[in-house]
Every structure is written in C-alpha cells, then in structure tokens.
Image (tube, rainbow, N blue to C red):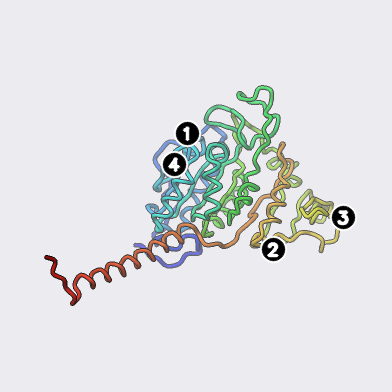
Amino acid sequence: MTTTEPLPFPGLVGVPTSDEKQTGKDYTSDQEVRWCPGCGDYAVLKAVQSFLPDLGLRRENIVFVSGIGCSSRFPYYLETYGMHSIHGRAPAIATGIATAREDLSVWVVTGDGDALSIGGNHLIHAMRRNVNMTILLFNNRIYGLTKGQYSPTSEPGKVTKSTPAGSVDHPFNPVSLALGAEATFVARTIDSDRRHLTQVLAAAAAHRGTSLVEIYQNCPIFNDGAFDAIKNPDTKADAIIPLTQGEPIRFGQQDEAGNPSKGIVRSATGGVEVVDLNDVDEADLLVHDAHTDDPTTAFALSRLTDAGVLHQSPIGIFRQVARPTYDDQARDQIVTASASQDDHRSALTSLISGSDTWTVV
C-alpha cells in the first residue's frame, strides 16, 4: 500500500511512500560484497542500508547512481534500483533521472577520484543547478580501484605508484569546492562514526536540492592511516571540530570539569581561527549557523581543514539553505509550455472550423 502523505523529509515530496515495515535487510541485495577487508566502505554501506527504511519509501522509488571506483560498486549491494554508470558522469546521469522522474529519490555514490578529477565539471554543475539529489562523496585520498595512484585530494608530497618522487599537486578541499559552487547543502562526516553519519544522511535526505556529503573513508590497503588524527582516541578531540547548528564552536581536549580547551573566533582578516578558550570571552566564540544564505563563513570554516595529514577538520553540516531546484523549475516550464500548446491548438481548431469559408478555384 502506498500514499503520498508528506514525510519528515521535504526533499522527497512527490515520491510515493509505503506503510510497510522495513528493515536494513530489505535493502540488502543478494550480491557478495567485494571490498578489501577493513575498507571503510563496509561501514558506510551498513549505515545506508540501516537508514533507508527511515525514509518510508518503496524500494522501487529509490535509485542509486555511481561512477567508477571502489565506492561505485555500491548500487550492487542495495536492493533498490541502481546504475553503475560512466567514469565521472554519475551526476549528469542522475540529473536526467531526477528531472524526468519526480517520483524517485535519487542518490549518487562517487569517490574523490571519480568526482573531482574526470567528473569535476559534472559535479560542480549539478551543485550549481541545485538538482534534487543526494551525492555521497567517499574521500579516501587515493585511487584504490586502480591500485594506489595519488588522487585530487592526496596531500602534497604523496609518494605513490604514479608519483614516486612525491606529488607536486595541490589538493582539492571538497567542501570548499562545493561551497564555491554554491551548493545548497554541504556536509562532512566520517565512515567510522555511525551515529553522526546517520544524522547527516537524514539531514541530506530532508533537503530539497543538491546535498553534497563528503565522507572520510579509510583505504587500509593503499592509504591506511590517512585519517588517524581524527580517529585516534588520543588525538581526535583536538582534530575534530564539531559543527552544531546554533551553538558556539568549541573542541579540544577537555579539562577536569569536562570543558573543551579550544574554540573558533573571527580572525582579524575576516576569516576564522582557532583560539585557546582561556584567552577569549565566551561571547567572542563563533556561533555556527548553516542556514545563513551567504556562504562566506561556511567557506572560512572549510579552510580550517589542512591539506596535509588532517591535524584538524570541521565535521558536520556547513551549509543548509533553500533555493529553487533545477528539476522542479524544468518541470514547471514543461507544464507551462504544454498549456500554451493547448491554447494554440484550440485557436487553430476554431479557425479551421469557423463560419468563414473560402472557395479556391
């Protein structure tokens, strides 16, 4: 049985819902999962399979589109519709699906190489257009499927099979890139933090428009330890900067009273900077507001992520604002054009069948 009653996910308005009780098993396909042991993709897959029942949708109204890479095997392992598409072109294909089929919940699964190298142009234009889709960008900072070449997010000096003397490329910051493209929803989470990952997925699904979720994902074979700073119990308090809507941004090792030691304030240059909480007043701390239409502060926060071994990184929702979506507007134009054509046909019919007649000799 289905219904079209509104869900707690406004981004899915128009997608038929189901009142059938679903579990993660309902979204688990019969395909053998083939990733390397210890790969972070397993944790993300399990989180997504467990989360999808919360949407309350029919499985046949959900579609996952992927490109090429380790993460792009994702559609095989979900009991939904899916497409393992072309290298870097998943956002373009998903744009067509979302525009033609309002009744589908459209997801894109891609990696840092697939999305930011050959697929960079497709990614930025999907975000610029604000197509109603959710993009999961798995960032392991390496090319895993092709066995360990450096990627667009690898740190400078990265020694790999393709850069034996060390990479001389400056890496992309995916969140900064998305904010620069004026994506309406931009977030970052971690493969090993199941609770936070699920919360971000729910917020992304609730958003109508393009949602870009960067997921830090460890590759134990070709880039193991890339995220040790934010995963190690001894260092993660100083490395993870949690972003919570409406709250001052604090982080760092806690004192005996359980208070964090660091915070974020506005810098003299107009950006943001890390300070010791003993050196500033509480009122000076930056209060996080992802709903601000101007992406300037969100971009400044994204720049706190270093390009090296990730000694620190903001985690959470950077931006979440409303803007008309490409696919909604395209469908509106079709309705308007169809109505106009009906008017033209009616006028032509009246002319042909009118009282005035002519005899041609």
Q: Rounded to the nearest whole Å, what is the CA distance between mark 1 and mark 2? A: 41 Å
- Compared with 243, 10 (above or below) is below
Q: Which residue is mark 4?
A: 77
* Distance in Å between CA atoms under marks 3 and 1: 50 Å
Q: Secondary structure at mark 2?
A: loop
Q: How many marks?
A: 4
Q: Residue at x 13, y 69 (%)?
A: 359
Image height check: is 305 above or below 168?
A: below
Is the residue under label 3 in contact with that under label 4 (CB below 8 Å)?
no
Q: Amino acid at mark 2?
A: Gly
Label 2 vs 3, first from the N-terminus:
2
Residue 267 as seen in the image, left or right of residue 59: right
Earlier sequence position, callout 4 versus callout 3: 4
Pointer 3 local density, CA inside 10 Å: few below 14, some 14–19, many at least 20:
few
Dot label at residue 233: none
- Residue 234 vs residue 220, the one in the foreground: 220
Query: Residue 259 at x, y = what percent?
Result: 80, 56
For mark 4, does the 10 Å Cα neighbourhood hold few (<14), some (14 to 19), or many (20 or more) residues? Answer: some
Residue 246 is labelled as 2
Which residue occupies 71% across, 52% down? 301
Ranked by sequence position, the earlier of labels 4 and 1 is 1
Q: Is residue 35 above or below residue 95?
A: above
Q: Which mark is residue 34?
A: 1
